[in-house]
Amino acid sequence: MSDTLTYFALFFMVATAGVLGAGLLNLMRGGSSSTSQNLMRARIILQGIAVLILVGVLLLAR
């Protein structure tokens, strides 16, 4: 179970980094500000999920 949660945490961390990168690229290219806002909201959600899963992994590893 802990291994599965570890892989989920890794997936969400990589997804968070990807969305962050996409948001920064959009910002540097002068893209739509609403697109930047949506990407940053998605980043916050993904980051929150990753943190919750990491807490779950740490609790199960005790």
Image (spheres, rainbow, N blue to C red):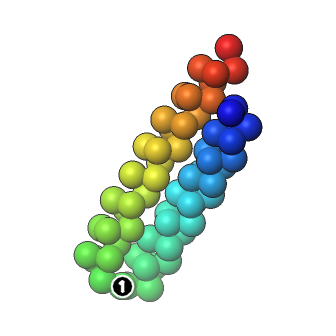
For this orientation, the residue located farthest to the top is: 62
* Residue at (30, 83) in percent of width and height: 32
**Numbered-mark total:** 1
Q: Name the residue beneath numbered marker 1.
A: 31
Viewer-closest of 26 and 11 = 11
For this orientation, the residue located farthest to the left is: 34
Viewer-closest of 26 and 38 = 38
Viewer-closest of 14 and 1 = 1
Amino acid on which disc 1 is placed: Gly
Give above or below for 42 relative to 35.
above
* Quadrant containing the C terminus in the rendered view: top right
Is there any visible trace of residue 23 in the rendered image? yes
* Residue at (43, 79) in percent of width and height: 26
Mark 1 secondary-structure assignment = loop
Which image quadrant for residue 23?
A: bottom left
For this orientation, the residue located farthest to the front is: 1
Q: Quick check: 3 left or right of 5?
A: right
Give above or below for 17 relative to 26.
above
* Residue at (68, 33) in percent of width and height: 1
Q: Residues within 10 Å of mark 1 (few under 14, many from 20)?
A: few
Image coordinates for residue 47, horizontal then vertical, percent: 47, 48
Q: Quick check: 50 left or right of 1?
A: left
Which image quadrant for residue 30?
A: bottom left
Image coordinates for residue 33, horizontal then vertical, percent: 28, 77
Is there any visible trace of residue 24 in the rendered image? no
Image coordinates for residue 19, horizontal then vertical, percent: 50, 66
Give above or below for 60 relative to 1.
above
Image coordinates for residue 46, horizontal then vertical, percent: 46, 53
